[in-house]
């Protein structure tokens, strides 16, 4: 997920850009009509847009961490919070009560509204437009890319190849009935889970990968409708996944996505690390073990290998 980025990432950027980044002042501007969204830029010259799409944690942690770094790398970086978890009395209060508190029918088409708004803001060149997402943010990014031909570049960490069921407090008694995403006012077809409520009750002991895999196995008839039509996206795509992802089987999803795009004659760059887990965004710093799968060392090695390739991919597909 897009979170817990260690300070080593900033150090990497400083080394990669000869220390120039340290002297660059990042300007932060709110984006009208998008609560808590921020445009991060350096200087006034128009720069390629990169929208940061958060994972299941929601809120704005990924924005505040990656926004300044991407801005110093030469992009008009946009932090777009679109979900702030609200579990009522069963969890802490939401950080942003004015954002959706459940991951249900999140509007993919807000990306088009965002692009239109950015077109009138200094420092943003919307004719070069990229998405940077992980986990649910990667799901969001791939859905959007399959619908908007003006998206030029997508970096998708720990992706999925299908749209999944939504979740939230109101879903406890309505399993299997709501989608994570919507487009044009219509909920997108989705793949249901199996055992979501039991997983909530189990807490950290829940097997999230099994909840996804078992739901998919239960509903083969929903596969075609739930599949994200990645072959409809003609632009550049970079996928990063770990073979021991404990959240969902992102490595299998990468294989499915590459297969679909190859059949359509589209090139895809895929980086799959067999011993790594779900938490692969950022540089090579070792992080505390969590529920992402893999080991801290394998995840760190994957990040260290992937990040320079992400930087080069974005430069090739957006900055040139």
Image (cartoon, helix red, strand yellow):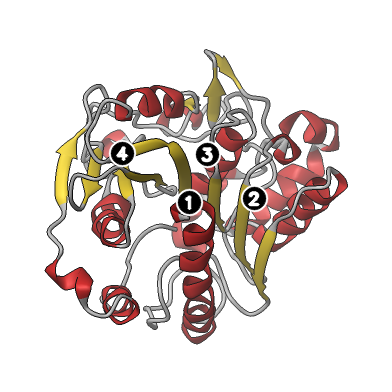
| Residue at the spot of label 3 | 140
Q: Where in the figure is residue 76, as x and y percent of width and height? A: 31, 46
Query: For the residue carrying disc 1, how many other residues have a C-alpha within 10 Å: few (<14), some (14-19), or many (20+)?
Result: many
The answer to whether mark 2 and mark 1 are in CB contact below 8 A is: no
* For marks 1 and 4 on the same chain, the one whose residue lies earlier in the sequence: 4
Residue drawn 53% across the image and 59% down it: 316
Nearest-to-viewer mark from 4 and 3: 4
User: Which residue is at a point 37% across and 49% down the rendered structure image?
Assistant: 57
Q: Which dot, 2 or 1, sits closer to the camera?
A: 1
> On the picture, is 227 further left or further right than 134?
right
CA gap between label 4 and label 3 equals 21 Å
Residue depicted at x 29% and y 50%: 63
Q: Quadrant of the N terminus?
A: bottom left
* Mark 2 closeness class: few <14, some 14–19, many ≥20 residues within 10 Å: many
Residue drawn where x is 60% and y is 41% of the image:
142
Is 122 above or below relative to 48? above
Which residue was labeled with disc 4? 124
Of 317 and 163, the residue lying toward us? 317
The residue singled out by tag 1 in the image is 318
- Please provide percent x and percent y for residue 294: 57, 76
């Amino acid at each position: 997920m897009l979170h817990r980025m260690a300070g080593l990432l900033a150090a990497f950027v400083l080394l990669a850009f000869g220390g120039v980044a340290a002297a660059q002042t990042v300007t932060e501007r709110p984006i009208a009509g998008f609560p808590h969204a921020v445009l991060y830029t350096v200087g006034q010259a128009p720069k390629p847009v990169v929208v940061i799409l958060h994972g299941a944690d929601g809120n704005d942690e990924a924005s505040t961490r990656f926004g300044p770094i991407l801005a110093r790398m030469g992009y008009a970086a946009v932090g777009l919070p679109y979900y702030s978890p609200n579990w009522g009395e069963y969890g802490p209060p939401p950080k942003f009560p004015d954002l959706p508190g459940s991951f249900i029918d999140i509007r993919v088409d807000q990306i088009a509204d965002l692009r239109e708004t950015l077109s009138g803001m200094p420092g943003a060149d919307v004719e070069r437009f990229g998405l940077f997402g992980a986990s649910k943010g990667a799901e969001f990014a791939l859905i959007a890319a399959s619908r908007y031909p003006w998206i030029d570049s997508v970096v998708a960490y720990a992706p999925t190849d299908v749209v999944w069921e939504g979740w939230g407090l109101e879903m406890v008694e309505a399993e299997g009935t709501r989608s994570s995403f919507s487009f044009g006012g219509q909920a997108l077809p989705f793949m249901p889970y199996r055992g979501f409520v039991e997983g909530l009750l189990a807490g950290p002991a829940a097997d999230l990968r099994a909840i996804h895999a078992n739901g998919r196995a239960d509903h083969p008839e929903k596969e075609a409708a739930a599949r994200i039509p990645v072959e409809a996206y003609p632009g550049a795509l970079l996928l990063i996944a770990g073979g021991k992802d404990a959240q969902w089987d992102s490595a299998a999803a990468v294989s499915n996505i590459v297969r679909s795009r190859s059949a359509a004659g589209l090139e895809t760059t895929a980086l799959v690390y067999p011993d790594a887990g779900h938490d692969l965004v950022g540089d090579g710093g070792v992080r505390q073990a969590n529920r992402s799968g893999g080991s801290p060392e394998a995840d760190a090695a994957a990040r260290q290998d992937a990040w320079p390739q992400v930087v080069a991919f974005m430069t090739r597909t957006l900055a040139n």
